[in-house]
Image (spheres, helix red, strand yellow):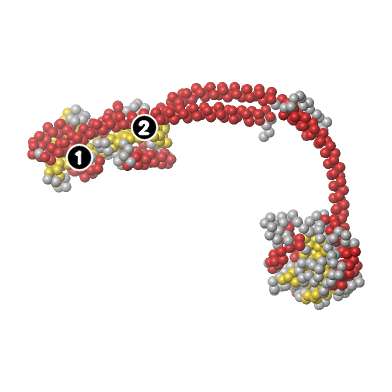
Amino acid sequence: MKLNIILKFILVVGIPLIAVYMFVGYMQYRSMVGMVEREGSLRAKVSVELLANTLDERLSLIGSATRSLAGYASLNPKGTRGLQDELLRDLINTDPLLNLAAIAWGDPSQTGMSGLSLERKDGTLDSSPLTEETIHRLVDDYSSVEQSIGNWLAPIRSSDGLAHDAAIVQPITIDGQTAGLVVASLSLTQLQDDAIRSSLSSSRFAIVNNSWIVLASTKTKHMGNPLVGIINPDETAAAPEDTTAFNEFLSQITSDRKQGKKSNSQPVPVRYDGDEYWVAWSVMNEPKWLMIDAIPEATLLEPVYSLLQRDTLYRIGGVFLILLCLLGSALLLTRRIRRLHAAMELVRNGDLDIRVNPGHGRDEITRLGEGFNLMVDSLSRNLDELARSEADRIAVDRELDIARNIQQSLQPELPPEFPHPVDFEIAAINLAARHVGGDFYDYWIMDDKHMAFMLGDVSGKGVPAAIFMGVSRTTIRMVAGRERSPDRILKRVNESLLKDNNQGLFITLFLGVYNIETGVLRYANAGHHSAILKSVDDPSTLVAGATGTILGTLPEAEWTEETLQINPGDHFILYTDGLSEAHGDDGVMLDATGIEQFLDKRKDSDAQTVCRELIGMAESIQSDQLFDDVTVMDLHRRSPEKRP
């Protein structure tokens, strides 16, 4: 999407300004939130400590009275038996929370215990001997009580399965043996009601034991249930992330208690009744229960939200004011730039006669206008020069295309035709790195039994190499019309080329004369690459190396003639350095070894296919960007079964 300069100005200047403006407001908001959170944390912690201490004082009094009665009974069992009704009345009147006080005499591990219980019903106290059922329940409670938490047991479930009571069970010990039990039972429902009256109206509390079972809560329905089960507002399974977060909170409480902490406060990222809460906890020392109090985070942050709403309205107005100021500034500052832009659009559409009034002064916009006028003048002149240069280039390209066609016409397109069937084929392909190149090849019939062929590479590239190639080819064909020996042909050609070689060009050349009846190849190699002989059953090997120096450099140069037997099925392959020196981006060249490995992986093919595959390999390695001319020739003597 394209933006005009006014919008860009507003974006470049206005957005950062507004961002800073909003960032300052955000930091103020965060500062207020942090302050409220700190105060809320302290408030929640103090609140839960006060509530826990209030209830703990009452439970401590109950615990002390129960332990005192058990201690007195241990020292004076006879006197206690005589006064047990009065003693139980004193115990149950210790606190209105108590609904039962009982003394059971005898060894809890044996049968035959007896005793007296005192129960509070409808505001009156009823005394009755312990029934077998009651004794059995007291023994079970004593067996279940945790000695490490002050002999408190909670919750105690009634016959209907509800968790209504908690109890402290204290043994009567005589001579080191348990001789009875003193039990004080209190109502968890009454404990819950007293806690509700003492807590903040907006808080949610829970009293839990060491197993995280709810003993009392803001909601009666949670009593006796696992604490983690009350965080789900929909009364269905809690969301996994809420459960995980709450379990982490409980683990943190356990860790803090092991470190000796008695209370703490922190935000917990879970939802209860649709709200998120700040949760504080405090240990109740007497029963070692945990008081957990939660204050809705919305209650803590309500002052912040009120201020935020007011400030938001102010800030929105401020943003609009900033935008209006920026718009006016942008229109004023960009007026001349917009005029300059309109002139540039006309130039883009081809109107080179347009000019702008740069104005006065030496500011950047004035210099920009002057530069624009100079640019249009230069552009007009350059376009004229470019048109002339393009016309010249087209003419040169046309001439180079003609030269390329002439060069291609000097190289045979079809294999030589003999008057009788032959058992060989020859093919060659040449690709120039430029329009014209210095690589060349040729083959022709010398007589009914011999065919001559050559492949050469002129030093350099482009037009000079192409011209020297044409002269060299013509000279070789002329000399070969009189001579039949490859070494003598090269000597005569070298003498001829030296006469007019003022540019210092030279040629590497392989010249061969092939006997079509015997398969014997006579050749002379003027500094060219060794050929590759690919047999049917044997790996490819290098053959026919140089038998003398390059052409066009030394007047007295000599070459020797060598022979090579081409057997049925053999491929005799010549190539220029454009193939062996082909390389990719890593700079590793293909070289002769790479060509041999490539040929060994190929099945027996005709000569044209071999040439085409080798050329394709060079193009693939160099990503179709040739660095040098590439020429490949293949003389293939067919196997008997493949002869026509």
SS at circle 2: strand
Amino acid type for the residue under numbered disc 2: Ala
Number of residues whose C-alpha sits closer than 10 Å to that of mark 1, classed few (under 14), some (14–19) or many (20 or more): many
Q: Position of residue 150 (x, y in %)?
A: 23, 40
Q: Position of residue 70 (x, y in %)?
A: 15, 38
The residue depicted at 30 percent of the width and 27 percent of the height is 198
User: Residue 528: which quarter of the image?
Assistant: bottom right
Number of residues whose C-alpha sits closer than 10 Å to that of mark 2, classed few (under 14), some (14–19) or many (20 or more): many
| Residue 41 visible here | yes
| Front-most of residues 237 and 42 | 42
The residue depicted at 21 percent of the width and 35 percent of the height is 63
* Residue of label 2: 294
| Left or right of residue 237: residue 329 | right
- In the depicted structure, whether residue 291 falls above or below residue 459: above
Mark 1 or mark 2: whose residue is earlier in sequence? 1
The residue depicted at 18 percent of the width and 37 percent of the height is 67
User: Residue 288: which quarter of the image?
Assistant: top left
Q: Where is residue 142 in the image (x, y as percent from the top left)?
A: 20, 43
| Front-most of residues 377 and 141 | 377
| Left or right of residue 237: residue 473 | right
| Residue 415 visible here | no
- In the depicted structure, whether residue 494 falls above or below residue 300: below
Q: Position of residue 21 (x, y in %)?
A: 55, 27
User: Residue 172: which quarter of the image?
Assistant: top left
* Residue of label 1: 169
